Amino acid sequence: MDEGKWTIGIESTAHTFSFGLVDPDGIPYPSVGDTIKPLEGGIHPREAADHHRDYAAELFRRVLESQNLSSNDIGAIAYSQGPGLGPCLRIGASVARTLSSKLEVPLIGVNHCVAHIEIGRQQCDCDDPVLLYVSGGNTQVIAKLQGKYRVLGETLDIGIGNMLDKFARQQGIPFPGGPVIEKLAKEYIDEHPDATLNGLELPYPVRGMDLAFSGILTAAQRLIEKGHSIGAVCWSLQEHAFAACIEVAERALAHSGKKEVLLGGGVACNNRLREMSTLMAQERESTSHAPPRMYCIDNGTMIGLLGYIELKAGRKTPFESSGIDQYMRTDDTIVIWS
Ligand code: ATP
Ligand code: FE2
């Protein structure tokens, strides 16, 4: 990597195609991106990939413009190598390879989950946190142990964001449903400050250190069918699902002896989740951190930052091993940086 040059990060694991920049000193700058929003139903991987392909040239131009740069200022290309949807990842990887060979700069494929951790550590100035990574596709509790980010607990079925989006869709709320559920839940509790969960109970989705969200989704739908208001059910859904995640994170703190919790992933935008995490951390004489919302959701900047860190530590991705890995695990990546 040339000294004095910038790193571009390309994120393409699912709905979002996003380009972000990291300056020569490793300082991240906001991404430019576009998210495909299906009119009905869930995301179709092929359609999302077509969306990403159509936006590639425009997003590359816009991200350079955002910092008044030209392609000569770029010294490295980072991209999400996995995990994610195959067709989407392939578009990101092929755009990255094209840019790397055209600009004659190094290429670095990075682990998307690890990128969520590193942008959070950088933004929140965390040293060695337990990460609660809550997004559409992923729900994991992670901590660094013996040179790798280890998954201490995770969802056994769907991701928490996916569960929220599915519940929302059943109520006719378009993707992404998480923010609307947050708003409805807040309105409900603001109007009913003495509300209790009596009659609004849902299954508690903790399984040892793991989680499972499909049962709670079905049960929440039943509460709606029984005539409970959507606001009440959204509130109960958040209270149960978030408490479960926080409980697993708390146990991870206890087992690992760490003192910081770091939230990441799109669901970490949620104020109620942030509040619960802060309360739990205070009770344990620990601290809770969450990066700005633009760095919780999928973004190219976090990919650029991890690429910058890995290149600096001496890693790069030769073309012959630049293929994507849909099933890449958080603990597949050896942490060669500190
Ligand atoms: P990954 O590839 O890491 O699984 P993703 O494709 O799900 O990520 P993200 O941008 O990390 O993308 O997260 C999107 C999810 O975050 C959606 O499920 C969305 O409903 C949820 N979300 C966004 N904002 C909120 C919020 N305020 N409250 C709850 N959920 C939210
Ligand atoms: Fe993500």
Image (cartoon, grey):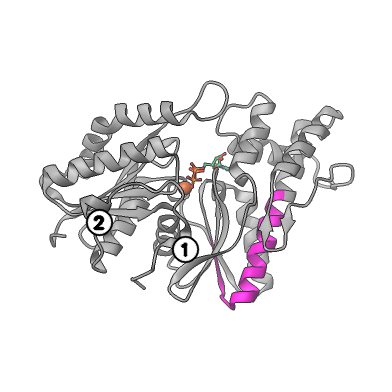
Residue at horizontal 66 percent and vertical 23 percent from the top: 172
Residue 102 in the image, given as x and y percentages of width and height: 12, 42
Mark identifier at residue 331: 1
Question: Three-letter amino acid code at disc 2?
Answer: Thr
- Report if residue 275 is visible in the image: yes
Question: Where in the figure is residue 241, as x and y percent of width and height?
Answer: 70, 49
Q: Which mark is residue 5?
A: none
Please tell me whether residue 116 is drawn above or below residue 228 in the rendered image: below
Q: Is 38 placed above or below 193 here?
A: above
Using the image, tell me which numbered label, if any, was put on residue 317: 2
Pick out the residue farthest to the front. Answer: 320
Dot 1 or dot 2, earlier in sequence: 2
User: Is residue 283 highlighted in magenta?
Assistant: no
Measure the alpha-carbon separation of dots 1 and 2. Answer: 18 Å
* Quarter of the picture holding the C terminus: bottom left
For the record, the magenta segment spans 241-262
Label 1 sits on a secondary structure element that is helix
Specify the amino acid type for callout 1.
Answer: Asp
Q: Secondary structure at mark 2?
A: loop
On screen, 162 above or below 149? above
